[in-house]
Image (spheres, helix red, strand yellow):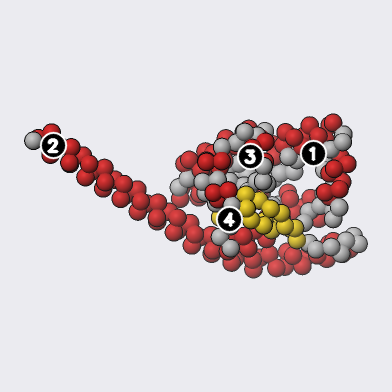
Amino acid sequence: MIEGISAIAINEKSIDMDKVEARRSFFYRGSKRVFDIFCALLGLIFMLPIALIVKIMYICTGDFKSIFYTHTRVGKFGKEFKLYKFRTMVPNSKEMLEEMLKDPKYKKQWNKYKKIDNDPRITKAGSFLRKTSLDELPQMLNILKNDMSLIGPRPLIPGELDEHDGNHEIYEKVKPGITSWWASHGRSATTYEERLALEYYYVQNRSLWLDIKCIFATIKAVIFKTGAK
């Protein structure tokens, strides 16, 4: 009889703990979403004068193409969406990349990092935007559309995770972010394997405190241009 009562008590305690965790999770998701929307609205206001300056800079170089760039990325639970960014490369960057990848030196870099050092496709305006991370500002629209969050693993292109034997269950468990644990702790200075490890760490340990730490780490990385290329 005592064993039965004890088992019931333990079961009830387990249920209570589950309820506490559920409430914590609900509070975290709710507060994170409110913060995301608030930051996105402020970001869009800040983006307007930046967009005007970027447009003028491109026009001065004879580039009259759109200053915005969209690309298909993978979001939460593997759902694909259109990611918005300021364009930082020449309009024919795709064709240039195809030619560059014929060179073993560039192909090796691209396969390992999905980036190329001193990429000739990047414009002068684009270089500034990347180093200051201002090219990410249009993703505030993605936040409002609920495709992304302010903080989360950086969104990948379809098939990219498979190329590096990544874990979909972990990486795609949350919405991708404008900044991430990887982006604020090394960014382009890390290998792809290190990048995934940093993103997995965030997903598995996410909390309001970790989000706050990530925000301050991002600010530090932007100011000192840590890992930016």
Q: Quadrant of residue 171?
A: top right
Spot occupied by residue 227 in the image (x, y as percentages of width and height) = 69, 41
Confirm whether residue 73 shows in the render. Answer: yes
Q: Looking at this rendering, what residue extends furthest in the left direction?
A: 1
Using residue 92 as the reference point, say whether residue 53 is left or right of it: left
Rate crowding at label 1 as few (under 14), some (14 to 19) or many (20 or more) other CA atoms within 10 Å.
Answer: few
C-alpha separation, residue under disc 1 versus residue under disc 4: 28 Å
Rate crowding at label 4 as few (under 14), some (14 to 19) or many (20 or more) other CA atoms within 10 Å.
Answer: many
Q: Which residue is mark 4?
A: 148
Q: Quadrant of the C terminus?
A: top right
Of the two numbered discs 2 and 4 in the rendering, the one whose residue sits closer to the viewer: 2
Task: Please tell me which of labels 4 and 3 falls first in the chain.
Answer: 4
> Tag 2, which secondary structure?
helix
Task: Please tell me which of labels 3 and 2 falls first in the chain.
Answer: 2
Q: Which residue is mark 1?
A: 117
Q: Which residue is located at x 63 percent, y 44 percent?
A: 183
Using residue 25 as the reference point, say whether residue 51 is left or right of it: right
Using residue 179 as the reference point, say whether residue 12 is left or right of it: left
Confirm whether residue 216 shows in the render. Answer: no
Spot occupied by residue 189 in the image (x, y as percentages of width and height) = 69, 36
C-alpha separation, residue under disc 4 versus residue under disc 3: 18 Å
Task: Please tell me which of labels 2 and 4 falls first in the chain.
Answer: 2
Task: Please tell me which of labels 3 and 1 falls first in the chain.
Answer: 1
C-alpha separation, residue under disc 3 versus residue under disc 2: 49 Å
Whether tag 2 and tag 1 are in contact, CB under 8 A, the answer is: no
